[in-house]
């Protein structure tokens, strides 16, 4: 119903106008999509005929995405019915650590082709440390180095979102170009891969990478010295055209293909999904909204905050994401990508929106699967 009303409104307005104009500046933050974005969304919505259940889910995603202050994209894929429902899901959003998925995909693809033994060992030294979250850093600083297998580096990169572990795997598989080649070969044209954590995070802050940034609070201290106009410009460039950008629709589709075993061997698929099941980050993002009996295998991503505003004022953040594979109590699968490209909304509001998305998926599932869909088939389960 929302789609039909929107199309009627667009037809009336367009009839009296030669062009449509954005209601907000391109880089601005708005709590609702612009007029042109609404028209684009409506055109996509009528490309296929939808069931009442799909219309209901579409309305839920529209309300959730529109209500959050910022630039938000949401995509939900129902593999059983081959239906993709989304809100602004064909726009590019910063991935941040969601891109660790594609490093893992590249490594496991190489392992399947006999080009990488995941049992092979690697050693992290001080010159290998990355910026931001990296639990490995403590061991390296204390002991001068840290050695483990590439299988363990992958596990740490995904389950703990360890940036240094991810960088170790990235270098071993051949760098960003190798990841881009795999994304291209797998057919993911709407998923970009950036230059790597260290250069990308430096560029977002208006800096050039120095290895000293990896230690202590050096990165944050140096970032404070960047002129505000330089930092603002770098931030705007990133969120407007993210080098690691991806569309929620592409990610939801990729996760579905991963789950069905279309991307990797059976053993590599099982390992990948097991790591995503064990993710520790973002316990109150999508995962926090799970109804009883539902499970999620997921990956989060969190970008930098443009903290050049007066103390106490809300600051924009570039990328606040969670993507994953939801499993209903009856075993049905849904893939979801929630990507907040830019927002200054309080974190609890972002989490509430994500919880709402999960609840909407659960509501949709109950409608399409029928009574009892929310209950486990196992009579002995809790």
Image: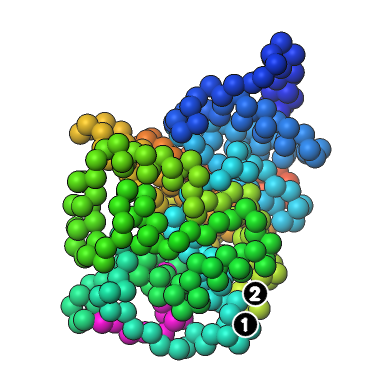
Q: Confirm whether the magenta stretch covers residue 146.
A: yes
Q: Confirm whether the magenta stretch covers residue 263.
A: no
Q: Pick whichever, 204 or 150, lies toward us.
A: 204
Quadrant where the N terminus sits is top right
Identified at 70% across, 47% down, the residue is 84
Q: Pick whichever, 223 or 276, lies toward us.
A: 223
Q: Which coloring applies here?
A: rainbow
Q: Which residue is mark 1?
A: 112
Q: State the separation of the CA atoms marked 1 and 2.
A: 7 Å
Is 218 on the left-hand or right-hand side of 28? left
Q: Which residue is mark 2?
A: 264
Identified at 66% across, 37% down, the residue is 58
Q: Position of residue 228 (x, y in %)?
A: 26, 38
**Bounds of the magenta segment:** 145-157
Identified at 59% across, 21% down, the residue is 21
Which quadrant holds residue 11? top right
């Amino acid at each position: 119903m929302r789609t039909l009303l929107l199309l009627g409104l667009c037809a009336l307005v367009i009839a009296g106008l030669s062009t449509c104009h954005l209601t907000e500046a391109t880089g601005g933050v708005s709590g609702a999509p612009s007029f042109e974005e609404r028209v684009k969304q409506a055109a996509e919505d009528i490309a296929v005929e939808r069931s009442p259940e799909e219309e209901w889910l579409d309305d839920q995603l529209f309300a959730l995405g529109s209500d959050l202050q910022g630039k938000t994209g949401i995509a939900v894929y129902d593999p059983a019915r081959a239906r993709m429902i989304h809100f602004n899901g064909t726009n590019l959003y910063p991935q941040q650590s969601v891109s660790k998925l594609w490093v893992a995909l590249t490594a496991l693809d190489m392992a399947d082709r006999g080009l990488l033994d995941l049992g092979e060992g690697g050693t992290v030294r001080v010159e290998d440390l990355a910026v931001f979250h990296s639990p490995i850093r403590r061991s390296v600083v204390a002991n001068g180095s840290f050695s483990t297998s590439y299988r363990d580096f992958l596990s740490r990169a995904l389950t703990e979102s360890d940036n240094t572990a991810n960088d170790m795997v990235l270098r071993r598989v051949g760098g960003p170009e190798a990841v881009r080649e795999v994304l291209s070969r797998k057919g993911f044209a709407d998923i970009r891969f950036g230059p790597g954590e260290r250069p990308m995070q430096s560029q977002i802050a208006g800096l050039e990478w120095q290895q000293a940034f990896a230690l202590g609070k050096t990165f944050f201290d140096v970032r404070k010295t960047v002129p505000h106009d330089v930092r603002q410009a770098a931030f705007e460039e990133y969120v407007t055209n993210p080098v690691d950008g991806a569309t929620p629709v592409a990610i939801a589709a990729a996760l579905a293909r991963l789950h069905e075993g279309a991307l990797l061997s059976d053993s590599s698929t099982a390992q990948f999904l097991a790591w995503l099941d064990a993710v520790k980050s973002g316990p109150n993002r999508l995962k926090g909204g799970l109804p009883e009996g539902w499970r999620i295998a997921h990956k989060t991503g969190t970008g930098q905050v443009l903290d050049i505003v007066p103390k106490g004022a809300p600051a924009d953040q570039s990328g606040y994401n969670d993507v994953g594979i939801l499993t209903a109590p009856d075993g049905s699968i849904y893939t979801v990508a929630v990507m907040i490209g830019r927002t200054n909304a309080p974190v609890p509001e972002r989490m509430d929106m994500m919880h709402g998305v999960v609840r909407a998926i659960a509501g949709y599932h109950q409608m399409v699967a029928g009574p009892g869909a929310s209950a486990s088939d196992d009579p002995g389960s809790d």
